[in-house]
Image (spheres, grey):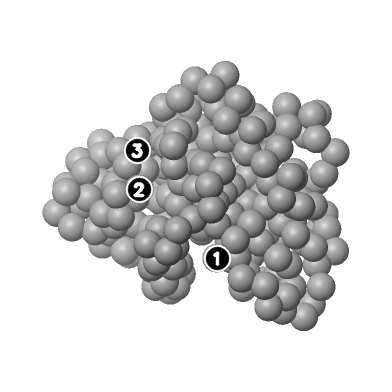
Amino acid sequence: MRIGIFDSGIGGLTVLHRAIRRCPGAEYLYYADCAHVPYGERTAEEICAFVREIVEFLLGEGAQAIVIACNTATSVAVRELRQTFSVPIIGMEPAVKLALDRCAQGRILAAATPVTVRGDKLHSLLEKWDEHHRADLLALPELVRFAERGEFEGEAVTAYLRDALSAFRLEDYSAFVLGCTHFNFFKDTFRALLPERVRLLDGADGVVSRLMSCVEIPAEPSGVPVRFFDSGECVESARLAQLEACMRRLDLMERIE
């Protein structure tokens, strides 16, 4: 089973990281659309055009299922992609239901890109599951840029997040939803800035579970290395080393709750 996973950049490595751990029997293609990052400030028309091209490329490379490892692309384009292509297409969604279910008391703060925060998909989720209106939304457009520069920690990151969070009474919250796959790279800084009782939650495990329910994946490890693509081009050794370093950082971030 060959699975194509894509994102606007490195954020989708969060999903790839979980998928490799839970479904080692698959072969993985990872497509980072770095030529067009960040999606969170693009128009819906631009995003739809980008992702159609990506899916066509991944299918041409033999993908039998597609994972949109990007909340922004999912919110804008998943319906059109499912209407256009016959393979299983699994999308991301912010883990607001998970947060509301796990944290019966206190408020929920969901952070995402501007497109996701404004989009119908997230607001539909809130209308469906947040009957008591416990969730608040926070757009963090600059965090994707920090991630794509490999600037995962430091004074600039901390100052940006501290300023963004200062608009909220953090002691009122019990969960913080990482509603963009890029945001997982910053779990250590979020953990340092948020009260200890606030849980950090994301949708990566949910999307991997949906993938497992849609396709049959062999139990035995495939032994096939991940093939990485950067906006349609095979990744060269220097870029591959950067991506491998990102995967190692995710090993560390996984331990933070």
Residue farthest to the bottom, as pictured: 220
Q: Counting other residues with Cα less than 10 Å from the Cα at mark 3, is it few (<14), some (14-19), or many (20 or more)? A: many
Task: Tell me how far mark 2 sits from mark 3, CA to CA.
Answer: 14 Å
Task: Tell me how far mark 1 sits from mark 3, CA to CA.
Answer: 23 Å
Where is residue 239 drawn, in percent x and y? 40, 58
User: SS for tag 2?
Assistant: helix
Is residue 50 or residue 192 the one in the foreground?
50
In the rendered image of this protein, does residue 220 appear above or below residue 174?
below
Q: Quadrant of residue 217?
A: bottom right
Q: Earlier in the sequence, mark 1 or mark 3?
A: 1
Residue occupying the point 73% across, 32% down? 81
Q: Amino acid under label 2? A: Glu
Residue 131 appears in the rendering: no
Q: Disc 3 marks which residue?
A: 140
Q: Quick check: marks 1 and 2 in contact, CB under 8 Å?
A: no
Q: Amino acid under label 3? A: Leu
Residue occupying the point 71% across, 37% down? 56
Q: Disc 2 marks which residue?
A: 148
User: SS for tag 1?
Assistant: helix
Where is residue 188 drawn, in percent x and y? 31, 64
Q: Disc 1 marks which residue?
A: 17
* Quadrant in which the N terminus appears: bottom right
